[in-house]
Amino acid sequence: VTFMAIAPEHPLVGEIIESNKNKDELKAFVEKTIKEDKITRGSEEGEKEGVFTGEYVVNPFNGDQVPLYIANFVLAEYGTGALMAVPAHDQRDFLFAKKYHIPIKVVIQRPEKDLDPETMDEAYVAEGNLVDSESFTGLNNKKAMKKIIKHAEEKGFGEGKVNYRLKDWLISRQRYWGNPIPIVYCESCGPIPVAEKDLPVTLPLDVEFKGTGNPLETSDSFKHVPCPRCNKPSIRETDTMDTFVCSSWYFLRFCSPHEENQPINTEEANYWMNVDQYIGGIEHAILHLLYARFFTKALKDLQYINIDEPFKNLLTQGMVVSNSYYSQKIKKYYSPNELSDDKKICPETGEALIVKLDKMSKSRNNGVDPDIMIGKYGADTVRLFMLFAAPPERDLEWNEQGMEGCYRFLKRVYRIASDFVSSGYGDRYQGLGLNDIGSEESNSLNNSSANLLRQTHKTIKKVTEDFIHRLHFNTGIASMMELVNTLNSFKAESDTDYRILKVSIDILTRLLYPVAPHIGEEINRMLGHKTPLHKGAWPNYSEEWTQDENVTYVFQVNGKVRAKEDLAVSLSEDELKDIALGHERIQQWLDGKKVVKTIVVPKKLVNIVVK
Ligand SMILES: [Zn+2]
């Protein structure tokens, strides 16, 4: 500690000024500073200003006398409004000490041991070990904090305390779209709250929006009301609350939306809360999320609810990014539409453009109009692309080729369904569902039908987990694309094949529906269903059918791969040997040779050693 600073608003300031020989200078500084914006004053960037009081204070840890300043960056509402400055390790203290030529003393040394006040150009605020700190020297600074507090408590000159950086929040706004502040100003009674029976105060409709000033000022019916206490003509408060006031607790109101007599029904709120999933941009992490948690905790302390934390899960979604094209010479961003096909050369100067991925914004001219995309590809494709291109917490890179791919995928789904309907089997299997495929039927399927059925079950499982539990829409969609590949190459030859095909297309439609509802519902009708998909149940899968029953075996002769075959996992070693030795492509390698031995590696390979 090389100096001490107190806020201009500090209660001791008056006393200090009165007895000071530089009374006028101090007074002028205090009067000027208290009028300044506190956020700027307290920030690291704000210009540091202060005056030396001529007084010294004693550091109780080592008895040192240090000068006492009144400084603009010390705020009365934070902590005690007074601080002991450690300029080597706090940037604001550092800037102040530099400006007023106050000594800077390193007391936390970094591992390189090279911090020197003479050469430092900013405060060192990371971890390190204490130096020049008497009995605390050598300790890690984080650990030392506890010991130092304990020492102060033992000696009786201090105690540990947690300071929250809470500041007053001015909630009034001169806007229409906020909650009215329920106060009426009466000439006789002063500001009077609106009677509880008249709450909530609702916004008036006879408002004129002029583009300037508070629109509520223009509504006579809103503004002129009788005083709630004496009934004399009075004026209603026209400021409204910051919209954050309402968004900080609306989820509690949603638990009992028809409640007439109070904002929150405690029983209902306790029953329905918490909110399972919170989704928002990263900007919410410091604003709405903080306010909503604060309101919830305050309402709990006031016993309106018994919930401590409002939200169970947080997902901060990524941004949509795309290439921006910048000309350095004329300092201008080009829209991709203004550029030639290679999109590298500035059309006005001929220079190479700076191309980089940027958050989509008007100023960078790299936005994409969703209406144009929807007009070109349809809303289902645009939605599918956005969910498929990246997991939601990552940035989504916009590219039209990806959009084309999704468009082709949906067209393929549609074609598979319409081919099925025109096969003539559509009518015959109306109403057939996954549950109608009994175990007897499913166990007697040929290979390709069994594979399709198995993959259908697997896809249900994957999409259910990815969509509902992990919010990883991209991998869920990818598994549907795999199912579509299988469907695409599936050749139905028997009635049973068609039954499985029908069930699989049906399931695919249901899984796809949340992502592509328009095409999903159209296929649903095409398949003859009368119930719209949004009223249908989410499909179930059978765990047994999500297991791979077949594995691909490699057949080797003298260690060289000569054939491959998909075979049931349940086959015994002897059965596998017989299949390998009898395989027509293996037999040509055995011709005229003697089999010395046959090695089976379960679920992998059969190697035949010949001489
Ligand atoms: Zn009154």
Image: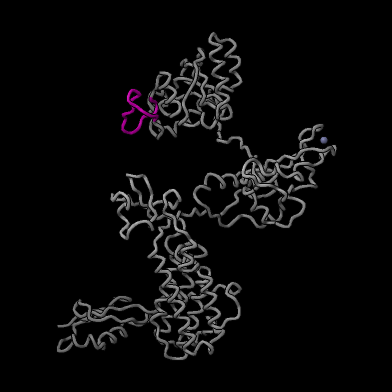
Q: Please provide the residue range marked out in magenta.
A: 106-123
Q: In this view, does 343 lie above or below 576?
A: above
Colouring scheme applied when the structure was drawn: one colour
Q: Give x and y (percent) for residue 153.
A: 54, 26
Give the side of residue 346 with respect to residue 140, left or right: left
Q: Quadrant of residue 482?
A: bottom left
Q: Quadrant of the C terminus?
A: bottom left
Q: Is residue 485 above or below residue 287?
A: below
Q: In which quarter of the image is residue 295?
A: top right
**Residue beneath the point at 46% across and 62% down:** 386
**Residue beneath the point at 47% across and 15% down:** 65
Q: Is residue 300 visible?
A: no
Q: For ligand 1, give the image quadrant.
A: top right
Q: Is residue 188 visible?
A: yes
Foreground: 232 or 579?
232
Give the side of residue 43 with respect to residue 127, left or right: right
**Residue beneath the point at 54% across and 88% down:** 427
Q: Give x and y (percent) for residue 488.
A: 40, 80
Q: Does the magenta stretch include residue 109?
A: yes
Q: Give x and y (percent) for residue 67.
A: 48, 16
